[in-house]
Image: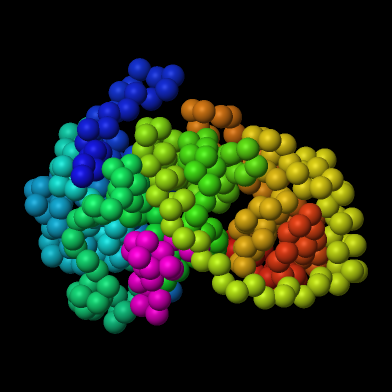
Amino acid sequence: MSLRPLYLMLLLVAGSAHAMSAGEYVAKAGDCTACHTAPGGAELAGGLKFPTPLGNIYATNITPDKQQGIGDYSFEEFDRAMRQGIAKDGHRLYPAMPYTAYAKMSEQDMRALYEYLMHEVAPQNTANRESDISWPLSMRWPLAVWNQLFHDEQPYQSDSGQSTEWNRGAYLVQGPGHCGSCHTPRGWAMQEKGMDGNTSAFLSGAELDGWYASNLRGLAQGEVVALLKKGRSQHAAVAGPMGEVVTHSTQYLSDADLNSIALYLHSLTKKTPQLQAVSAIPEAIMASGKQTYAMYCSTCHGNKGEGVDHVIPALAGNTSVTADNPLTALRVVLEGAHTPITQQAAATVMPGYGWALSDQKAADLMSYLRGSWGNQATQVTAEQVKAARALKQH
């Protein structure tokens, strides 16, 4: 069963004369730019900071510069780094680099990506920055043990019981797209609790770096395609780091690939734990939240949280609003948000109201949103707001 390798998918960018090479398409699907380009830095020259429980680490230079980048890498050395997390000089990469997902890529796609990075990307002599992790936690030999426990180097294997389109979507999601890196909860050793749909935790939602990446299992196909292509659908919009994924990666994927991804995600059984009664939110809190909503939110989102189709997200039935972890919705209230800049739609901006709302007022507003128009979720506390507010400085 063919996976229609990425190296065959050549994309003409809408409204532009720029035709992507096979390797550039793979790089877009893998979202290399988002992680390997620092704010204000040269593309793919590294330097972007990633906070971890042990300390900060920094993305490396993957341009073809021979001193600071990967210009001296053979294909075999590049492939080893991508699949096993081992650099040319033998040191092990932290699994913040999602080699656990890239290991599933086909050889054709890996070779196409290598050719793109070596011959189409401008070399940048930008020095790599050492991590802020102090010794002895900075020792990398334990990563070999980590790999033995948690890493499978086998490329993606087609499921003969599924269609070609389903397998294509599974390949993109599990492999180059590395969706599980953000959307799958992690275990005691920071390993993803599942790498494919055989595990119910896979793509079930996770908190990462101050945001909550939502549950992707069982999503409606049309909604997925619209969100990945335009950053918004009829009733929803992406926010937080996912906006960068749309801007740098998914908007460039072919319609066929987006539909394959949507088909695969829709096929995953959504975990539906036994419903527990949600305690009624106190009337005083609901009244306070309703007053704040009328003052700051109803003009755009409507008196019943209905939003405006394809422009302003609905709050009624909004999964970010009603998620067990309200962190992303709470940060949007405090800091504001904007939809991604794409070729398909102009960005829209929502202002943040952290300046105007006390922790308690913001908590009351969020509680009102989570308990109105059919939404049934738990009350948000002022302590949760205070913690979310602090993340802006993170």
- Stretch in magenta: 187-205
Q: Residue at x 64, y 72 (%)?
A: 275
The location of residue 277, given as percent across then percent down, is 72, 75
- Quadrant location of residue 163? top left
The answer to whether residue 200 is above or below residue 250 is below
- State whether residue 290 appears in this view: yes
User: Of helix, strand and loop, which mostly describes the magenta segment?
Assistant: loop
The answer to if 285 sits in the magenta stretch is: no
Using residue 105 as the reference point, say whether residue 336 is left or right of it. Answer: right
- Horizontal side of 267 relative to 99 (left or right) equals right
What residue appears at the point 27 percent right and 32 percent down from the top-left corner?
9
Q: Nearer the viewer, residue 180 or 42?
A: 180
Q: Is residue 202 magenta?
A: yes
Q: Position of residue 188 (x, y in %)?
A: 40, 80
Classify 264 as above or below 101: above
Q: Which color scheme does this rendered protein use?
A: rainbow
In this view, which residue lies farthest toward the front?
A: 161
Say which quadrant the C terminus sits in.
bottom right
Q: Is residue 206 above or below residue 41?
A: below
Q: Residue at x 81, y 64 (%)?
A: 364
Is 273 left or right of 173, judged from the image as shown? Answer: right
Q: Is residue 337 above or below residue 195?
A: above
Q: Position of residue 307 (x, y in %)?
A: 73, 41
Residue 188 or residue 51, whichever sits in front: 188
